[in-house]
Image (tube, helix red, strand yellow):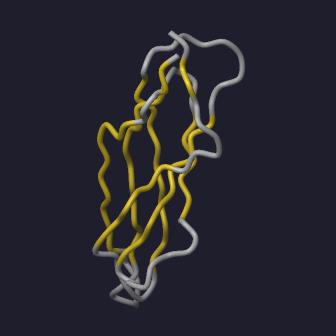
Amino acid sequence: MNAFTYGCVEWDATEEQLPSPLPDDCILRVRGKLTCPSPGYVIEVKKAQPQGVDPHQVDLELIPTAPSGPVPAVPTPVEFSYEEYVTGGYYQTVRLRLSLSKPITVIK
């Protein structure tokens, strides 16, 4: 039995200024792919709790949910995305962290 190590294949974070009377209003968009142990995974992205003390940094949690039923043990990139309306400020740094409720193993 081998434990599978998740891997972030690629990700990107952008901010888009909004046409608003307030010049600091924007939308933060984070998109990427996480390599999961098999096809059929779903990745939930939510703001981590607690956040740090830097108001210009946001920590996001990637929460993978395994598929139900049998699936092949083939590492598969799974897309994820996150959007947040940011008012009166901006983020300079986005950090992702993987949150596993239980260890997942793949039997070869």
Q: Residue at x 62, y 37 (%)?
A: 65
Question: What is the x, y in percent for residue 100?
Answer: 58, 45
Q: Residue shown at 32%/58% (left/top)?
A: 13
Residue 63 place in picture, x, y as percent = 57, 47
For the point 42% across and 71% down, the residue is: 58
Q: Is residue 11 left or right of residue 100?
A: left
- Relative placement, left or right, of 24 versus 101 is left
Report the residue that reaches farthest toward the right: 69
Q: Is residue 3 above or below residue 57?
A: above
Q: Say which quarter of the image contains residue 18.
A: bottom left
- Report x, y in % for residue 1: 52, 16
Location of residue 52 in the rendering, given as x and y in whole percent from the top left corner: 45, 78
- The residue shown at (47%, 30%) is 36
Residue 21 higher or lower than 65, as above or below? below
Q: Please say if 29 is above or below 39.
A: below
Looking at the image, is 6 positioned above or below residue 60? above
Depth check: give the residue in front, 44 or 4. 4
